[in-house]
Image: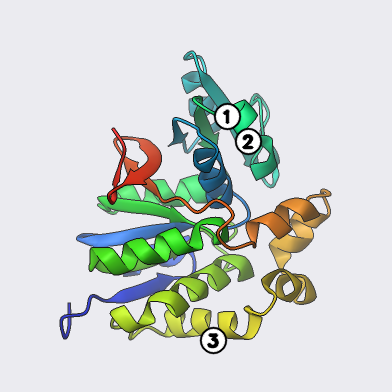
Amino acid sequence: MNGNKPALHTALSPSMLHLYDANNTIVVIIDVLRATSTIATALYNGASYVVPVDTVAGCIELGKEPGTVTAGERDGKIAEGLQYGNSPFEYPRTFIENKILILTTTNGTRLLYMALEKGAKNIITGSFPNLSAVATHLIAQKQNVVLACAAWKDRINLEDTLFAGAVIDRVKGYFNINCDSSTIAHTLYTEAKADIYQFVKNKQASHYLRLSSYGLEKDIQYCLSPDVADILPVYAEGKLAVAFNGHSRP
């Protein structure tokens, strides 16, 4: 820390994560379209917890346990062998309450496992649907932060960068930010914040085009909507659960 303020950095792609220190740091996993938006939504709607898995085979194996739902995607479509996809609309309270969601995705769950391999011990997930919960937590914890964007197969994407910028906009007074990636993210968000969805659409963001070609416009609009599932998913012991006083519930 410097000047009694913790430091904040932004990794715009998983390929850049190795450049940052994950020890004694809160790592925020960001995969706006759609993994971290879906995680927040499922937990907000009463899922017991979410188990992020890095392979489809692992997801299927864990899904043999009672009370579980196997879900995930590869390249934006439901992965073969899984029951459900990566759309937040698949997980209303009437369906997901008190169930365990076993989830694997192309980018988000992979990045979480990369952070673990780097020694991260304090991991949360962030998306526009839980923006305020993330910002409030980061301010309260007074620890160094890495905003880790899942991007798309290591290629920087617009929506994750915008979310990093949105977090920075909320917390910048509480951190030392000497990081050009963070400056880029915040500058972009400042331009986009009046209408994030329209900005992403007008810029023809690559993942916007990918998902809209599958008829998922509604998903995109939801995933770019602030605070519609405003809880804090915290990772502990292989599970993402709703934070209770800053820690995942037992």
Q: Earlier in the sequence, mark 3 or mark 1?
A: 1
The residue beneath circle 3 is: 187
Q: Secondary structure at mark 3?
A: helix
Residue type for callout 2 = Tyr
User: Where is the N terminus found, in terms of image quarters?
Assistant: bottom left
Mark 3 vs mark 1: give the one in front. 1
Distance from the alpha carbon under mark 1 to that under mark 2: 5 Å
Q: Secondary structure at mark 2?
A: loop
User: Does residue 73 appear in this view?
Assistant: yes
Q: Residue 20's quadrant in the figure?
A: bottom left
Mark 1 is surrounded, within 10 Å at the Cα level, by few (under 14), some (14 to 19) or many (20 or more) other residues, namely many
The residue beneath circle 2 is: 91
Q: Residue 221's quadrant in the figure?
A: bottom right
The residue sitting at 61% across, 51% down in the picture is 34
The residue beneath circle 1 is: 96
How does the figure colour the protein chain or chains?
rainbow
Distance from the alpha carbon under mark 3 to that under mark 2: 34 Å
The residue sitting at 47% across, 38% down in the picture is 54
**Left or right: 182 with respect to 80?**
left
Q: Position of residue 249 (x, y in %)?
A: 31, 37
Q: Position of residue 121 (x, y in %)?
A: 25, 50
Residue type for callout 3 = Thr
Q: Earlier in the sequence, mark 1 or mark 2?
A: 2
**Left or right: 111 with respect to 42?**
left
Mark 2 is surrounded, within 10 Å at the Cα level, by few (under 14), some (14 to 19) or many (20 or more) other residues, namely many
Identify the disc placed on residue 136.
none
Residue type for callout 1 = Ile
The residue sitting at 32% across, 75% down in the picture is 8
Q: Position of residue 219 (x, y in %)?
A: 72, 51
**Left or right: 211 with respect to 107?**
right
Contact, CB < 8 Å: mark 1 with mark 2?
Answer: yes
